[in-house]
Image (cartoon, rainbow, N blue to C red):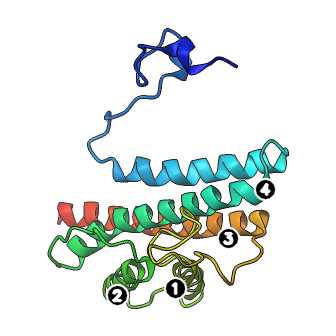
Amino acid sequence: MRSPSDFAGQQLFIQGEDWHNNAMLGWTHFPWDIYAAGYKDAADALVGALAERKAFLDSVVYPLVFLYRQGLELQLKLILPLARRLAGKEAVADHQHGLMSLWSELRRHLGQLNPREDEKELPAVEDFIHQLDAVDPGSFAFRYPTTKKGEVSLPELRHVNVRHLSEIMDSVFMLLGGIYSWLGEMEQNNAYY
């Protein structure tokens, strides 16, 4: 391992000669989807590292749950503008972090766009979003050990089975991805008529 002084005077963000390690930023005109997918992919990579015992479970659980939560928040913020347009609503900037308020609005629009909404899957997703939002309503509980008031961030939560969490989050992201695709097709079809 090298010391910081070994890198003195170098820039943090560069394009290196080892091209396979160069991530490309700013190449998409609509970055919400890549940000949402990135947080989900990072969480999945952590679950993989944990399965191979390459990380310490009791410390990695905090960034892991944060990554899933952030990915879910961004996924909802990706879908909502499309749902609003299709429902004939005004565009709104989503600066709040509450998952349930984002989900509730999306669910209203989905009900308007398809009154025969899925009676089994959407309530299940809503329950999982509610559970995550109840534990971490402001997106701080898994980032900081204490609240802004100095209280313990997660006073009641004692265990998280990361395999179980990962499986549920995979199903939630799969359904939300399907909703996004369905709404996108609906928007394209509306453009032709």
- Seen at 41% across and 29% down, the residue is 24
- Amino acid type, label 1: Asp
Asked whether, in this view, residue 120 is left or right of residue 138, the answer is right
Q: Quadrant of the C terminus?
A: bottom left
Which residue matches tag 1?
118
Residue 108 numbered mark, or none: 2
Q: Are marks 4 and 1 in contact (CB under 8 Å)?
A: no
Disc 2 crowd, CA 10 A, few/some/many (<14, 14-19, 20+): some
Within 10 Å of disc 4 (Cα), the crowding (few <14, some 14-19, many 20+) is some
Using the image as rendered, state which of residue 20 and residue 82 is in the foreground. Answer: 20
* Mark 1–mark 3 distance (CA, rounded to whole Å): 18 Å
First in sequence: mark 2 vs mark 1:
2
The residue that disc 4 covers is: 57
Marks 3 and 2 in Cβ contact (< 8 Å): no
> Local crowd at mark 1 within 10 Å, few (<14), some, or many (≥20)?
few
Residue 76, percent from left and from top: 40, 68
Q: Is residue 131 above or below residue 57?
A: below
Location of the N terminus (image quadrant): top right
User: Identity of the amino acid at label 2?
Assistant: Arg
* 29 over 58 or under it: above or below: above
Instruction: Say what secondary structure mark 2 lies in.
Output: helix
| Front-most of residues 123 and 40 | 40
- Side of 56 relative to 70 (left or right): right
Which of pointers 3 and 4 lies earlier in the amino acid sequence? Answer: 4
* Residue that label 3 marks: 168
Question: Does dot 1 land on a helix, a strand or a loop?
Answer: loop
Please give left or right for residue 36 compared with residue 185 in the image.
right
Q: How far apart, in angstroms, are the residues tagged by discs 4 and 1? A: 36 Å
